[in-house]
């Protein structure tokens, strides 16, 4: 049986996915979450995690157009 990574803990998993989706480096993620860079590398290369990172990236990309529309609605 495969040993669970610290990155599989729900909070750490969410933070790691958000950071990678924001374009942060794997080194930065490893420092922030106190895990090795190799753990982060294995984590982001898992098929289940790749999909979650892609979803998070897409949701981040949708934010700027919404923000622009909100500013337009305010008449700024």
Image: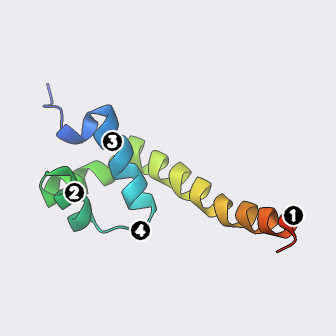
Which comes sooner in the sequence, label 3 or label 1? 3
| Residue matched to label 1 | 73
| Camera-side mark, 1 or 4 | 1
Q: Write the residue at 33% across / 33% down.
A: 10
Residue nearest the observer in this picture, 26 or 31 = 31
How far apart are labels 4 and 2 at the CA level?
A: 14 Å
Which comes sooner in the sequence, label 4 or label 3? 3
Q: Write the residue at 55% across / 49% down.
A: 55
Q: Is residue 14 left or right of residue 28?
A: right
How far apart are labels 3 and 2 at the CA level?
A: 12 Å
Which comes sooner in the sequence, label 2 or label 1? 2
Which comes sooner in the sequence, label 1 or label 4? 4
Residue 10 higher or lower than 28, as above or below: above
Q: Which structural element holds mark 3?
A: helix
Around disc 4, counting alpha carbons within 10 Å, would you say few (fewer than 14), some (14 to 19), or many (20 or more)? Answer: few
| Camera-side mark, 2 or 1 | 1
């Amino acid at each position: 049986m495969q040993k669970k990574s610290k990155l599989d803990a729900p909070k750490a998993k969410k933070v790691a996915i958000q950071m990678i989706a924001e374009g942060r480096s794997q080194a930065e993620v490893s420092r922030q979450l106190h895990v090795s860079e190799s753990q982060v590398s294995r984590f982001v290369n898992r098929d289940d995690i790749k999909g979650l990172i892609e979803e998070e990236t897409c949701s981040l990309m949708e934010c700027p157009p919404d923000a622009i529309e909100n500013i337009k609605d305010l008449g700024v």
